[in-house]
Image (cartoon, rainbow, N blue to C red):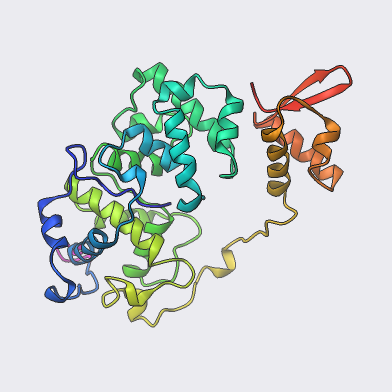
Amino acid sequence: MTAVRPARTAAAPLSAAATSAAATSDAASPAPTTPDPATPDAYAGLRDAVGRWFAETARDLPWRAADRTAWGVLVSEVMLQQTPVVRVEPVWRAWMDRWPEPADLAAAPTADVLRAWGRLGYPRRALRLQECARAVVERHGGQVPRGEAALRALPGVGEYTAAAVTAFAHGRRAVVVDTNVRRVLARAVGGVALPAPSYTAAERATAAAVAPPGDEDAVLWAAASMELGALVCTARGPRCGACPVRDACAWRRAGRPGDEHADRRRTQAWAGTDRQARGRVMAVLRDAPGPVPRAVVAGAWHDAAQLDRCVASLVEDGLVEQVDGPGGALYRLPA
């Protein structure tokens, strides 16, 4: 996922210390040393260097604007799961123009919601987001609730999203850890190429230890570390020469050893998968003005048995409805 920069507003202001540090050149400050967890505030140097870098290079994204809303941040975080910023931004803008408040999305026809989601992928996220909007309206009077516990009680909101909304929308300390932050911490602190395939208790403890105690600084660290992982400390081809903590990075100082978990990582080609077939079916139904017969759906995919399986799974997931027509079954997006 991509960082949401904390705007300089009352909701989530940057700290005075961070603002002052951002104005100081890298040459004026010594490079941070590799953190020693046994020392007090061992990670201050790491945080300061990344914070200065972020202040100078952060992307200008709409969900980081000073007038952002908690709802807009929540929508962005759901869309950015497994989808790059370049694809999300235009959809997010159109979405927020159309449904600027949870009540607007809650009342929308589900078919319109799925069409607006378009080709972002994983369309069940759109269904969960609408369910979330309805829960916000029913349980919280249409206002995105504060507090990670209340957020996690919403449909489709897990640990990461609750922490991100708490930090980037409400300006409160939260340990925000996505794949980008995991990678930054794995390399800079852990000295390994990539984190383990699954989030571990040790990673959780490290992330909590690195996050500063105060609200403002914790929000800044969350945004900056996510940005660093997205733009510099990438999974493939990390740009170590541009990294603000390159001289202190435990992985770089160890000679950039290989991925110790490489044999446990699962990779799956896109071509020919059920995901691709499901996407083709969804594209046909998004473009259709109404219910379509089986013959039209059949034109979306070459393997009849696989198509049957995928259509059945789409119906089961609530993404497609099967209705009776005069000549047999018809298929459409949910009403």
Name the main secondary structure of what is drawn in magenta.
loop
Residue 333 on image: x %, y %: 67, 28
Above-or-below relation of 188 to 253 = above
- Looking at the image, which residue sits at the far right? 327
Residue 200 on image: x %, y %: 42, 55
Would you say 323 lies left or right of 237 here?
A: right
Residue at x 52%, y 68% (from the top left corner)? 261
Residue 29 on image: x %, y %: 13, 73
Residue at x 23%, y 40% (from the top left corner)? 172
Residue 84 on image: x %, y %: 49, 53
Residue 333 counted in the magenta span: no
Residue 202 is at least partly visible in this image: no
Image quadrant in which you'd find residue 325: top right
**Which residue occupies the foreground of this view, 47 or 197?**
47
Range of magenta residues: 37-43
Above-or-below relation of 256 to 22 = below
Quadrant the C terminus occupies: top right
Would you say 11 lies left or right of 327 here?
A: left
**Which residue occupies the foreground of this view, 157 or 54?**
54
**Which residue occupies the foreground of this view, 117 or 311?**
117
Q: Disc count in the image? A: 0
Would you say 55 lies left or right of 128 here?
A: left
Above-or-below relation of 81 to 140 = below
Residue at x 48%, y 34% (from the top left corner)? 156
Image quadrant in which you'd find residue 173: top left
Residue 318 is at least partly visible in this image: yes
Would you say 220 lies left or right of 17 here?
A: right
Above-or-below relation of 33 to 13 = below
